[in-house]
Image: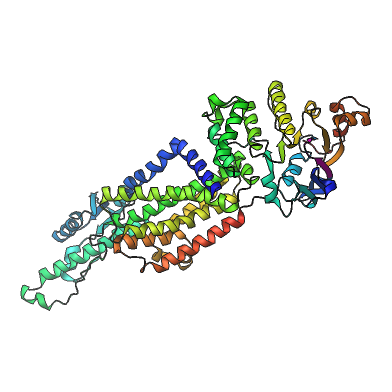
Amino acid sequence: MRQLKFLLIKEFQQILRNKLLVRLIIAVPIVQLVILPFAANYEIQNIKLSVVDNDHSEYSRKLINKFTSTNYFLLNGYFYSYKEAIHQLEKDNAELIIEIPKNFEKDLIRENETKIFITANAINGQTAGLSVSYSNSIIRDFNNDIRIEWLQPARINSLPTIEVTSSNWFNPKMNYKYFIVPGLMVLLVTLVGFLLTTINIVKEKEDGTIEQLNVSPLKKYQFILGKLIPFWIIGLVVLTIAQIVSFVLYGIYPVGSYLTIYLFAAIYLVALLGFGLFVSTLAETQQQAMFIAYFFMMIFILLGGLFAPIENMPNWAQFLTRLNPVSYFIEAIRMIILKGSGIKELATHFGIIILFAIIFNTLAVYSYHKTN
Amino acid sequence: MTTPAEKDIVIKVENLTKRFGDFTAVNQISFEVNKGEIFGFLGANGAGKTTAMKMLIGILNPTSGKANVAGFDIYNQPEQIKRNIGYMSQKFSLYEDLTIAENINFFGGIYGLNDDEIKFKSEELLTKLNFHAIKNNLVSSLPLGWKQKLAFSLAIFHSPKIVFLDEPTSGVDPITRRQFWDLIYEASHNGITVFVTTHYMDEAEYCNRISIMVDGEIKALDSPKELKNNFQIDSIDDIFYLLARKAKRIE
């Protein structure tokens, strides 16, 4: 125990002396939580719209009005031909083209049927998909309007329609920040904890100081605890800063309890830092360590369910997310913050993260050798 | 562990070998080091000195052979060995971002010294090296020679039976080297066995006995005086050249 105390004192003396690092540890979560929730916006607005109206009728104007009166579309201009409009799309001045055919109004009245042509720029698939589905619902709406207009008012009731009313449980206003901010907290804790631990040990290798520790009577577990505890504390500090920022800036606080968040984070950090220790035993230089750590960070983020919903992934990718500790913490923290889940509801998550902690730390203990 | 006859032998090495793949870094070396002795381990760069030393201090597993350090077997009791030895590597592994005082405290602490011992011994150390005024300076700000003196003092801070020094004086001026050897003599005088590798032949003269290693093998081992007699050459430098010329390994 006494040896461990000296290791911890030494570690904190080194960390606190590194003024830039201390500032980064405090500033990184604040800056990221201020900027990223705005950047990672899932709502799509102001889709640039080019219109080719070959009909110039009352109905065609009504339809265009319906598009431009929403916040979703921003009229970029009217064009005489589809060719001109597609040129706008090629120059990135337009993301969506609506072409209304000649005789749109006439066909609609006489034949009860007409066609509209919509072209979306699918370079960004997500925007394209959303803008087409927005368009579809606007056109459906327009369709209903004219049907009602044509039918006699007395007969409105005979029109069989199913109206769908939806409500968003746990996030009534569908505020995407409630969704993204808890996930960001997890990433910040992960980034700081994982990178710092990995780099720290490899730096000792590069400086040759680890050799000095290996010839000392220091026990393996003392060395590992001496490296885990400082970054475990720093991880919890980062989490606290993130909680404060998200409350002050976005009014986000858990429906469940802070205690559950911290308990989960405490175990999660043991797992994560164990993995960091394991990675550091594989790398000989800080450059290698950075590269390996970055590789895993990318996987952690992309397969963590923060940006892309896990449910949308193919089966093999979904399976990989089950091997990613980050995905459990993101899921758990969302459940605690939005839904108010407690330890009982999160029993599986706790169980799995404890398992991760045991596996990673066992790996770390086995792969760290005092003797080569 | 040791029979009475071997009491004064603190390092006993028999046919110690280390291979990395098909490269034999250390080839069946055997020697003994007596208690209180200054034992010089000479060789050109790449001769296998550091590899041999790393096996003795328990941070590198040998391929074959036997060795006993401070009464303990290097295969089965590396942790007991570590409690009884000090080590100063080529890189002088002090923490550059800690102060002199913080380094002293840390190394005292991990060797299990209690607070009073650390306090008493660090006073002694600071006085001996005349570091009182600068004890709160970062190690990174010290000149190389001072770092080496501090590193050596910390290697023997916990009063080990043997101290292993791996090219402790490379890159410093002759005056500092002389001062460094005064520290080595003092440690030896206090009963600490000194095992030192070097490629400075003038330093070989300061040792009680020296071994000359060429291509992973020990080619000569005796006191400097006896070596000169045997080879009929009156400088260690020339003996070394004579032996090292046959080396096949390129630096």
From the viewer's side, name the closer residue of A195 and A71.
A195
Does residue B134 lie above or below B110 as drawn?
above
Q: Is residue A31 found left or right of B205 in the rendered image?
A: left
Q: Report if residue B59 is visible in the image.
A: no
Residue B35 is inside the magenta segment: yes
**Which residue is most to the left?**
A154
Residue A310 sits in quarter:
bottom left
| Residue for point 14% across, 66% down | A145
Residue A293 inside the magenta-drawn segment: no
Q: Against B64, is B148 above or below? A: above
Residue under the image location 42 percent in, 60 percent down: A327
Left or right, A352 with respect to B40, comes to: left
Magenta stretch: dominant secondary structure: strand
Q: Is the residue A156 above or below the residue B1 in the image?
A: below
Which residues make up the magenta segment? B30-39
Q: Where is residue B43 drawn, in percent x and y?
A: 80, 35
| Residue name at image x 48 percent, y 39 percent | A13
Q: Give coordinates of residue A214: x percent, y percent.
A: 64, 46
Q: Is residue A351 visible?
A: yes
Q: Which residue is more in the foreground, A72 or A354? A: A354
Q: Position of residue A326 (x, y in %)?
A: 44, 58
x then y, percent, for residue B180: 69, 27
Q: Nearer the viewer, residue B95 or A115?
A: B95
Count of numbered circles on the image: 0
